[in-house]
Amino acid sequence: MAAPSSLASSNMSRLSGFSRRAVAFTPATSAPQQLRLGCSRRRAQRIVAMAGSGKFFVGGNWKCNGTKDSVSKLVSELNAATLEPDVDVVVAPPFIYIDQVKNSLTDRIELSAQNVWVGKGGAYTGEISAEQLVDIGCKWVILGHSERRNIGENDDFIGKKAAYALSQNVKVIACIGELLEEREAGKTFDVCFRQMKAYADNITNWTDVVIAYEPVWAIGTGKVASPEQAQEVHAAIRDWLKTNVSPDVASSIRIIYGGSVNAGNCADLAKKEDIDGFLVGGASLKGPDFATIINSVTSKKVAA
Ligand code: PEP
């Protein structure tokens, strides 16, 4: 597999400075559901990864799906599921159903919005403020999702949204990730670091932030990143945080993977050292599948 960018080699050597253990990094040879890109450019390389120390985290992004009835069915499935205790679980229904879910879902699972206004509420037609999320007991918000970047939200606006949400005690799932053409052009690290910088320019306290690495080519496409592809970028993000924010933030923050995660592929991804959980779209609409993904934390324990 190709290094995502020309920054790869310098990052690989910087990574070794804070390693806990070295991981041999070799390209996938056959993975029908996985996208393999640019394998010829770099045959194999060693990356050295540092695992985060945070609790496993799984978020379900329901996007613009559902009706009162289907939401009620999904909530019943989630309430009936047996979930491993040592996982933070969050679901993000469409705004209009958050209150319904809040009133029917087990407290074991926290609620997230899929978007929030950039500042205090007021004359902003169609928007929802962070204060209103707090008012209805919604503790999280997903920001920087590629589906919102795609309709015009830029890095700076997303960074400002994150800062305002955090200032109101709304926790942030901060998404980043490259387009297919950016990966193919070797710009994966450049794009992810640029998006990370926009968050870092605005965020002063990272305690309530989870980073979601979601390669855009993997979202909703069925083309999941290979565990090695995801691990490589997660390790690089952690290294970027160590250099540009602080070693403490780098080791404590959760970096979760999103992009066509399902009940069948979650266990192999979860085993990777720097993958601290998942952000799940399609598969989060099926209660039993989402529960399997949450419980993939057990693969992580076996791998440790
Ligand atoms: C997402 O929308 O954040 C996502 C990862 O979607 P999917 O799991 O369907 O690819």
Image: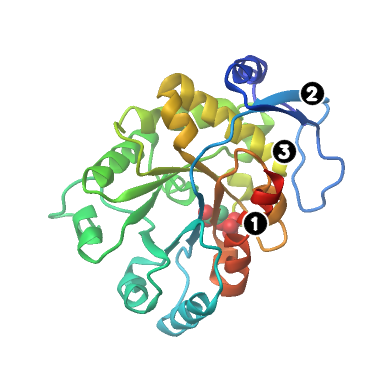
* Relative to 160, residue 242 above or below: above
Residue 191 visible in the picture: no
Q: Quadrant of ligand 1?
A: bottom right
Where residue 143 appears, x then y in whole percent? 39, 47
Which numbered disc flags the more N-terminal residue, 3 or 1?
A: 3
Q: Quadrant of the C terminus?
A: top right
The image quadrant that residue 230 belongs to is: top right
Per the image, label 1 sits on a secondary structure element best described as helix
Foreground residue among 278 and 150: 278
- Label 3 crowd (10 A; few <14 / some 14-19 / many >=20): some
Reading the image, the residue beneath label 2 is: 42
Q: Which mark is residue 243?
A: none
Of all residues, the one furthest to the bottom in this rendering is 69
Tell me the kind of residue under disc 2.
Answer: Arg
Reading the image, the residue beneath label 1 is: 298
Q: Are marks 3 and 1 in contact (CB under 8 Å)?
A: no
